[in-house]
Amino acid sequence: MKYHILTDKNINTFLQNIPKIREYFDDKVLISKEIGDGNLNFVFLVQSEKNPKKALILKQAVPYLRCAGESFALSRDRMSFEIRALRSYEKFTPSFVPKIYHSDEEMSLVVMEYLGEHIIFRKALMECRYYENFCEHISTFLAYNLFYTSSLHLESCEKRQMMDSFNKNRELCKLSEDFVFTFAYMEHETNVIDANALKDAKELFSKMEFRKNVLKLKYIFMTKSDALLHGDLHTGSIMVNEKESFVIDPEFAFFGPFGFDIGALIANLINSYISHLYENEDEKYREWILKTIEEIYEKFELKFLSLWDNQKESSLIVSNFIDEKTLLLYKKDFMQDIFSQSIGFAGCKMARRVFGIAGVEEIRGMKDLEKRADANKKALKIGIKLIENYENIKNTKELIKIIKESS
Amino acid sequence: MKYHILTDKNINTFLQNIPKIREYFDDKVLISKEIGDGNLNFVFLVQSEKNPKKALILKQAVPYLRCAGESFALSRDRMSFEIRALRSYEKFTPSFVPKIYHSDEEMSLVVMEYLGEHIIFRKALMECRYYENFCEHISTFLAYNLFYTSSLHLESCEKRQMMDSFNKNRELCKLSEDFVFTFAYMEHETNVIDANALKDAKELFSKMEFRKNVLKLKYIFMTKSDALLHGDLHTGSIMVNEKESFVIDPEFAFFGPFGFDIGALIANLINSYISHLYENEDEKYREWILKTIEEIYEKFELKFLSLWDNQKESSLIVSNFIDEKTLLLYKKDFMQDIFSQSIGFAGCKMARRVFGIAGVEEIRGMKDLEKRADANKKALKIGIKLIENYENIKNTKELIKIIKESS
């Protein structure tokens, strides 16, 4: 369908013309409410008038920066990559992605399940809520989506074909290159530095050794195409309740290094851990966060390896190419690389939050300026340690030790 | 222009309709002769009747395997990638690629300078010819094309855009994965094994340790997008005379790891070196080949670094991100990786020639079966050493030492 922007006025007609959605609602009157709080897209909550529990979300990208107005052009292609990533998740891990009722790249929109009984994982962490199934869920999400879109599973041509449909997501890759790997570590107009943190910032900006490793990691990010990534898997891109976990908003999706999504998640959990040294001061909860980090990685690794064990033939390893004993050694090295890079990326994702343009709510939102500065100092310390030592940190035990020692 | 196959009958009219070519010949009568000896494409030598020195080459791909007939379909897209790579070479190293007069992706053809006074570098090596400018030329070709299509030079979006125009070259990438990195090291129906080499083959096919490194290198080949590669840079893809060197036939072009083209060239030079232990037995010439290998790499490295020094800003390293001292350390690691990978790829390119489907003429063409078996043994020995130790061989001196010790 030719692109046009949906509003309260035309959304009903549009939705009634999609059989699957008409069938779902079975109601001629739909109530739509724009609930988007983001800077980019329009998000409508659509409900059946006679049964408001019947509800779906419609998300549409507009060709400009929503929060800045129509004069700030911004390609709405991002929605195509989001749709393609969601469709890939739907294929490999349908339980961990909202059910998709309709998607239309030309209209830059997707209609999906309304997660009315779930909350953003970041908020849940801020409220000290426990989720006993989260590690199980997210480790499956990571293992399955990373493995099934990699050369360990896909046919060679199939993988390059799939890469083709994400390779045009250039602008958002460039954003990550700039904001995750560059500007936050140097004097830059986009940085946000509290008055009482100027000294810390100056100190960071004079450190050169660790930037060598930032460059190494940035170069891996720019040139390594292991698997389809979410590209922005922080705790704000995950919605949870006691029973379910869903990954949303994969507009940064592209083919990149295995460790990037894992690192993003670990970084955000460590940030949450640090915030709880000041807010709530609930030691038990802090321990739960650390246990969560460990479990996510360990479960991810086991599941990834188990998928690999069951894969008898792939574009990388054809049958009878290598014996079991040697393959085990190969896998060991391979997994060690994924771990190291996850740690390095986690370091970047932490360090960039301190002075970079996009802080994390749980730290940048702290009212007490002294506490905030102190929390930032700790986040920075851990981030730098992870970046400086990413090639030598061997397992989650060592990671947890570093977090504890530095906070 | 809509695709149609050119023949003696219609080629004249076709060429006369292209102003640049009409102008070049300035002759109403053109003599065309099909001179293609390859399996894939048609190659016409086109000459002016009144001045036969005025000559061009027209190369057209057909949608089937030429040597097998029309029933063996084969996409003619390969010519599009060849054209795009030639155009990129023309931009960065016009002196080392035949002058292009016309290219048409829809017609799957390119019209270019006729290299009537040059010979294939492989033949030249077999005839013990010396080329004093070759190292200078090919090192510039490698350094410029690799640097200028990498993230060390291109803008982030520009690079991803350029990758887009090669990412569909899937079939030929798959060929390399299969024939350079897989089948030649295991029992496989495509292998070609002389009766008196069955024992050596069996021994190779039982070696597992080195295959772990083959897998590592294959995985780098499959997932690393450093720069635009030729993809098949053996000595048969280079034409030379005393004054000039030209790279041709980049139909395997794609974005891959820096070391792959360099490794291919080194491997083919080593094979030539080995062949001269038996044919000609000219020690001075063998020494010249070894010196050539050393010089190519050393000059490549110097030129690559010099381009990098002059690049003040890139998508990887923005101004003021890192100080000179630390940048030097970063560059040192970076270049060491390129070297190691070049060595590893050289090993694969050598070892795969021994029992794999595509041998090299100077060894597989040896009439004396005992000598041939012996030469193959040496090629295999060096190939395996390079693969097994690629991460530890530090410089060209060590490489030359291995070649000498193993032959």
Image: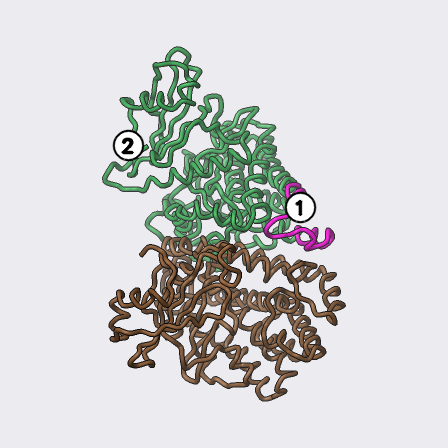
Chain colours: A brown, B green
The earlier-in-sequence mark between 1 and 2 is: 2
Q: Amino acid at mark 1?
A: Lys
B295 vs B219, nearest the viewer = B219
Task: Give the quadrant of residue B287.
Answer: top right
Q: Which residues are magenta?
A: B305-331
Residue A153 visible in the snapshot: no
Same chain for the residues at labels 1 and 2, yes or no?
Answer: yes
Residue at 60%, 28% (x, y): give it: B132
Residue at 55%, 73% (x, y): give it: A266
Task: Give the quadrant of residue A186.
Answer: bottom right
Q: Which mark is residue B312?
A: 1
Residue at 65%, 69% (x, y): give it: A354
Residue at 42%, 47% (x, y): give it: B176
What residue would you read off at disc 2? B4
B213 in magenta: no
Q: Is residue B201 left or right of residue A235?
A: left
